[in-house]
Image: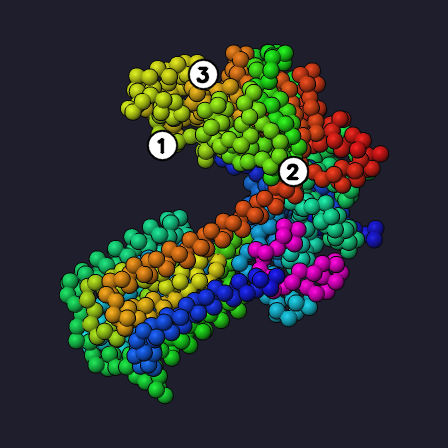
Amino acid sequence: MNETNNLINLEEIYKSFHKNNVLKGVSLKLDEHEVISIIGGNGAGKSTLMKILTGVYRADSGKMEIGGERIENYNPAIAHEKGIYLVPQEPLLFPNMTVEQNITFGFNKSKYEIREETKKLYAELGWGIDLTRLASSLTIAEQQQLEIIKGLLRKAKVLILDEPTSALTFSETKSLFEVIRKLKDSGVGIFYITHRLDEVFEISTHAVILRDGKVTLKGNIKDFTKDMLIGGLLPIGSESKHSDSFEKKYTGQMDRPPVLTVENISGDGFKDISFKVYQGEVVGLAGLVGAGRTEIAEAIYGITKCRKGRILLGDKDITQLGINETVSNGLSYIPEDRFLHGIFPISSVRNNMTAQVVRRKGFFIDNKYEKEVTDEYIDRLRIKITDHHQEIKSLSGGNQQKVVISRVLSTNPHLIIMDEPTRGIDAAARSDIYSIINNLKEVGFSILLISSDLEEIERISDRIYGIYRGKCNAYLGFEAINAVNVMKAAFGTYEGSDSYVEI
Amino acid sequence: MSKFKTLMKKREFRTLFFLVAIFIIVGLVNSDFLTIGTIQNSLKSSLLYIVLAVGLTVVLLTGNIDISVGGTLGLSAAVSGLLLKNGGSIFVSIVVAILIGAIIGLINGLGVTKLKISSFIMTLGMLEITRVIQVIYTDGQWVENLPAGFKQLSQMNVLGFNLLLIIVMAGVIIVHLFLTRSRKGRYFSAIGDNVDGAILLGVPVQRYVTYSFIASGVCAALAGLIFASQIGFISTTAGLGIEMTVIAASVLGGVSLSGGVGTVIGATIGAVIMISINSALIYMKIPAFWNDAISGLLLITIVVTDAVLSRRADKRTKKERLKARVLHQEEVSINHAHAK
């Protein structure tokens, strides 16, 4: 048992997409009987690394060895041949095929042979999915089981599990862990990608932390504590890295009644969320992608309905109102995906900016008024355009976002919800937007900020609520905000989090 | 679980049931409809549609669509018709027709896979182009007076059954077995079912999408030959508007427009239904122009039902997924124990 064989050896892997360096020299080794947890924030490069391992992407440079053998021309078919199998986060089954068809798909063996082997595996793992069921009828846990079985039938020596527990219930997670242990004992090497630090300690033998395309920490799990992992996730020298053009000071008016009160709301993807936003402050909802932040914002804005609880805007109950009504009551939402929901790409800058106020001007569109509004905001937010009628599509990401912010401001909202306001925006424009947000709050706007960029949350929020797996279990006041605490809040390990409170 | 089993069977079963229902209802109104002769005639006149529907189904399974079938049919029929008229052998003209279909299919396939043109636009353009080429090639003339030997092909009987009918049926069964049983045949529906999954399992997606268009082109060419043999002449508008009938037939037969679902058997039954509705209207003494309205209505009903069902399923899974994410009380206590 001590004689372990190397399964995978990656050395100095680099990968970039359109000048965006995603992986900056990652080296990684996996031996038999190892479960390596790969931890990293959003955009750290985990998925890219795994796609390189499975041959979907090709590395720009670097060395790759599988089972001691140097690999040059690589693609998914070879990956399967070599026994590397990815169980994706969203199972990639064929929903309109039966379980058996899914298992046998692309296999060279006879159906009967495969059926026998499947039965053997079922017995070993204690699973039993009816082979004649349609894949679309399976629960998510069953779909994952099916993916794992597919991998094992292909004699996988390396199994990559991409956030396998993100859609599993508690007992399903337990049984998955049992299987992982069995597989580990039988010699399979496993890469386990996760956000959940508890799970890392429960099942892995080693931990690797990826941050910003580099491995910042790796080693035996026994040598680590949760705080050390959090430390590895933090930007190096994060305290002094950025120089803001503004000085953050608290301008909230907590003595006055809150602008937004959220009381115990529950819905799909979140549960028992309560928080308040006061005038003149930026409140951050810190959490990882999939934690439920966007779902909460959508419930407040009226895109979805919550099952329980109350949402008050000022003293008006807006819990059951639709988007139209929440907007007319003074709520504004800058959505996550600017290109999908935020702009009208082939319309002019002016039309985009005045899209929400145009209807207030009677039957005809008031051109003069539109021009005034546009001029005002171009000046105020320093938007760089050549002319009002330029297509918004042709602007840079930062300027597009400024137009979106202008549009929102033109409705004179009580509360602005911003979901990932600087995604896909370069660094210079980013700090521009930060100072705009800072100005807005000083003028008296209230802002609810949602971002998975934890540094961003830390830099511009006055108060922070940590959202972890659909629950709000951490609160950071103005003084408590720093990189470590924000990271802890997002990963659900902040002292005072639910998981540490006596029940 | 058994619910899903029956649901799965339902797709083809539903169509067959519908076909039988048409015959019974029309038969009750006018018993002449139920004679063997009428049924044979219905089958015979739907042959061409069956062949087209089989080819189209292969394309639809991959999640694409082929609208150029009418044009391919016309062009290949006209070219091989002229060849026959000028004394070419039947064998050569068949080979030429198949080649034309395959080339048009190849161009369609490459346009969709390499140039990333949506299959709707690509094949729509191809439909117009092939029509014009046909007019240029035939100088805008009808191709008439085809040799009797060629026209005889569609009239031959074996053991009391039409020979072509037997060949086409055998072909349908072979294609069906290929698509559902063989390893490579199942690639087609896998691509339409889940492209990313197919890529991950090493399916050469682009190549197989191209194959599907070639298959459809060849089928359209074969349909062109059947058309020429059955009708005896090829007008410049041969097969005009036929693509809509064939798409309707496939969808009616349970082939999903979004890909991944359906069988050629279903599409075959769908094609027979489309023709049967046509002749049923005559037997029920309803003006024939109702035909298009009825098939249109059927098409919308089926597509809408499918869309509503799949949307509901999507919503349910999304909900389930979101719910599972929320931290549960039991986990909290376990983690708590760990922390200690």
Residue plotted at (53% across, 25% down):
A417
The span picked out in magenta is A118-144
Q: Amino acid at mark 1?
A: Ile
How dense is the environment of label 1, judged by Cα within 10 Å: few (below 14), some, or many (20 and up)? few
Residue A164, how many percent across, how many down? 67, 46
Residue B176, how many percent across, how many down? 46, 70
Q: Which residue is mark 3?
A: A381
Work out whether mark 2 precedes mark 3 in sequence or the reverse, and give the earlier one.
2
Residue plotted at (45% across, 30% down):
A324
Work out whether mark 1 precedes mark 2 in sequence or the reverse, and give the earlier one.
2
Residue furthest front in the image? B29
Circle 2 chain: A
Q: Is residue B250 visible?
A: yes
Q: Which residue is mark 1?
A: A346
On screen, A124 above or below A31? Answer: below
Residue B63, how many percent across, how many down? 44, 55
Report the disc number at residue A26.
2
Q: Quadrant of residue B99?
A: bottom left
